[in-house]
Image: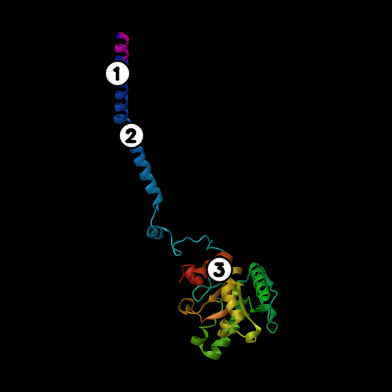
Amino acid sequence: MTGNRKGKRRRAFVLILLFLVLSGFNFFVSPHIRDKAGEGETVSVSASAPAQSETAREETSPSEEDKVSTVDKSSEYLILVNKTHGLGKNYEPEDLKNVNSVAGDRDGKYQKMRRKAANAFNRLTKAAKREGHIIKLTSGYRPYSYQQILYRQYVKEDGKNRAEQYSAKPGYSEHQTGLVADVSSPSVNYNLVQAYGNTAEGKWLAKNAHKYGFIIRYPKGKEDITGYEYEPWHLRYVGKDAAAEIYSRGVTLEEYLGES
């Protein structure tokens, strides 16, 4: 009997000890387990939510106008020549060369371009030809003396005000830079006319010239900025990167350089 009582007391002690252990576990440990589970649920909800709303992203992402240009605007190929920015009377590029595709009924002396521009023009006309378009240079580099002859002739024929809508004074013509190509095609009998912009060749140029470093220098609707009538035939070499930016933004060279 004594042994039985001792055994019962031992079992009672063990049960009491076990109860105390379990009670302590629930009191001290369980709350922390629940807290951790709660943190996990919170993180889960947070992770599933967008980090930033669409509106916020749109407000913080830079627009096309805000993006900084990576083009060196001091490049010699971005020289600005217009009615207020001229060249010296004796200015003549040293690297002029002939181009491959020229109109045969024009003076070959004035069908040259600066080397880099000429090479780009050759690539342009070759690409156009692959797509079935014949594009030829009618007039490239013009020295001061030749521009003077042309300008006087146009003033005599149309008067000064009218002539200056399509012809530059000597020393203020882009042609003197050697970076310009007046172009035309058989579809308009190699004439320089605004209707050229509606031809297959003119449309191809408007869409693709920038890929070769050229821009349509005097676009339609920008006459008040350029100072000249719309000329879909007047290509100006500025380099591929600058041409791509000018084309994508739909601006003139003046606007691009901040000179408008």
Can the viewer see residue 90? no
Q: Amino acid at mark 1?
A: Ala
Would you identify the image quadrant in which residue 6 lies? top left
Give yes or no for residue 3 being in the magenta stretch: yes
Q: What is the crowding at mark 2: few (fewer than 14 residues within 10 Å), some, or many (at least 20)?
A: few
Q: Please, is residue 109 above or below residue 18 in the view?
A: below
- State whether the magenta stretch is mostly helix, strand or loop: helix
Q: Secondary structure at mark 2?
A: helix
Whole-number angstrom distance, CA of label 2 to CA of label 3: 65 Å
Give yes or no for residue 102 being in the magenta stretch: no
Q: Between tags 2 and 1, which lies in front?
A: 1
Query: Residue 159: where, in percent of width, then height?
Result: 51, 89
Where, quadrant-wise, is the C terminus in this rendering? bottom left
Q: Amino acid at mark 2?
A: His
Q: Which residues are magenta?
A: 2-7
In this view, the residue in front, 96 or 65, is 65
Q: Earlier in the sequence, mark 3 or mark 1?
A: 1
Q: Between tags 2 and 3, which lies in front?
A: 2
Q: Which residue is mark 2?
A: 32
Q: Secondary structure at mark 3?
A: helix
Cβ atoms under marks 3 and 1 closer than 8 Å: no
Q: Which residue is mark 3?
A: 243
Residue drawn where x is 53% and y is 70% of the image: 247
Q: Between tags 3 and 1, which lies in front?
A: 1
Residue 12's disc is 1
Query: Residue 206: where, in percent of width, then height?
Result: 56, 75
Residue drawn where x is 69% and y is 79% of the image: 108
In this view, the residue in front, 63 or 237, is 63
Q: Amino acid at mark 3?
A: Ala
